[in-house]
Image (spheres, rainbow, N blue to C red):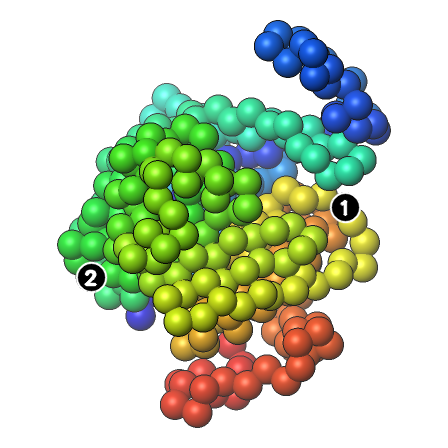
């Protein structure tokens, strides 16, 4: 069974602001905002939702297929991803375009202000799940909005289980586009703020979402996450970090851990615990792909916070050695 990850491929430009953004917003002048923040540092990192998610899956012993479009500047990035254990055979380089770019400033409270340039990502709709054979699980993470709707439609038609992860694109996608992604999803995953955007744009309540999808997962930062199905609601704690460095890519790492749990046949709430552990590793490093760990290190950290990690009796991965 193949695991396919779709999403943006980008380079991240990460900047650090030594103050608090909120101290510079004037409520009485919110109708006309003009601000410039002088940052102390800037780092360029490999990023994008697709590679970030795939990277965590690779760390956890999977060999995910990355399906995305990239620019002419992707050659070295492709080599690095392949060396990390990610199959990039479905990545198409677009002539005359650069990879997407993510410009993000983070303040001392880990609040972020970001802009995203689409670049080659705008061509994502030229790819199709019809070229993928034996796909058992896919994630549709932030990408060109039209491509996200197309991928969801293809997955429904072909009977592929998929996670719909609109995340940052909740602000860009229309209500009808978001509804199309939700319908038929195995899991819809958003953070608490994005859930409100999703509700407003689609006019779908939590009950309505669960009538169209198997499960809803809402991430809540340091407060962990909530897993909701038609049968249960479970709170999953966040794993305390040893140090706070950068929140970029933390949500993507969570999704990678979640997908590993699903690939192993775990219940959604247990899979979400794997997501919590994976997210904390990313939080402790700059960028979405700067961290590394062995399976034994990951398992030990899991068991420190959640107790023994055991596979289902009928699971082919029993023994938990990726």
Q: Quadrant of residue 312?
A: bottom left
Residue 195 image offset from top left, x and y in percent: 48, 44
Q: Quadrant of residue 178?
A: top left
Give SS at disc 2: loop
Residue 117 image offset from top left, x and y in percent: 48, 24
* Quadrant placement of the N terminus: bottom left
The residue wearing badge 2 is 159
The residue wearing badge 1 is 245
Residue 89 image offset from top left, x and y in percent: 34, 51
Residue that appears at 77% across and 18% down: 24
> Is residue 322 shown above or below 81?
below
Disc 1: CA contacts within 10 A as few (<14), some (14-19) or many (>=20)? some
- The answer to which of 67 and 300 lies nearer the viewer is 300
- From this viewpoint, is residue 289 visible? no
Disc 2: CA contacts within 10 A as few (<14), some (14-19) or many (>=20)? few
- Outermost left residue: 157
Please give left or right for residue 317 compared with residue 149 in the image: right
């Amino acid at each position: 069974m193949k695991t396919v990850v779709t999403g943006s491929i980008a380079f991240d430009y990460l900047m650090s602001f030594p103050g608090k953004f909120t101290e510079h917003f004037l409520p009485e002048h919110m109708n006309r905002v003009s601000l410039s923040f002088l940052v102390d540092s800037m780092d360029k990192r490999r990023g994008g939702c697709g590679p970030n998610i795939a990277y965590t899956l690779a760390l956890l012993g999977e060999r995910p297929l990355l399906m995305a479009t990239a620019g002419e500047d992707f050659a070295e990035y492709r080599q690095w991803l392949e060396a990390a254990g990610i199959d990039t055979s479905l990545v198409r380089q677009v002539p005359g375009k650069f990879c997407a770019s993510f410009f993000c400033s983070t303040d001392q409270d880990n609040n972020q202000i970001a802009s995203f340039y689409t670049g080659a990502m705008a061509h994502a709709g030229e790819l199709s799940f019809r070229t993928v054979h034996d796909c058992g699980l896919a994630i549709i993470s932030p990408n060109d909005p039209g491509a996200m709707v197309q991928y969801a439609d293809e997955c429904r038609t072909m009977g592929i289980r998929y996670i719909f992860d609109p995340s940052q694109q909740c602000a860009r996608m229309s209500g009808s586009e978001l509804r199309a992604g939700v319908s038929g999803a195995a899991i819809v995953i958003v953070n608490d703020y994005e859930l409100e955007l999703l509700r407003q744009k689609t006019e779908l309540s939590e009950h309505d979402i669960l009538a169209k999808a198997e499960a809803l997962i809402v991430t809540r930062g340091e407060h962990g996450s909530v897993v909701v199905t038609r049968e249960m609601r479970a709170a999953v704690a966040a794993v305390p970090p040893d140090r706070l460095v950068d929140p970029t890519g933390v949500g993507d790492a969570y999704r990678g851990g979640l997908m590993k749990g699903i690939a192993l046949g775990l219940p959604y709430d247990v899979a979400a615990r794997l997501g919590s552990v994976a997210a904390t590793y990313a939080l402790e490093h700059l960028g979405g792909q700067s961290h590394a760990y062995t399976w034994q290190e990951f398992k030990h950290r899991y068991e420190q916070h959640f107790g023994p990690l055991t596979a289902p009796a009928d699971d082919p991965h029993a023994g938990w050695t990726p």
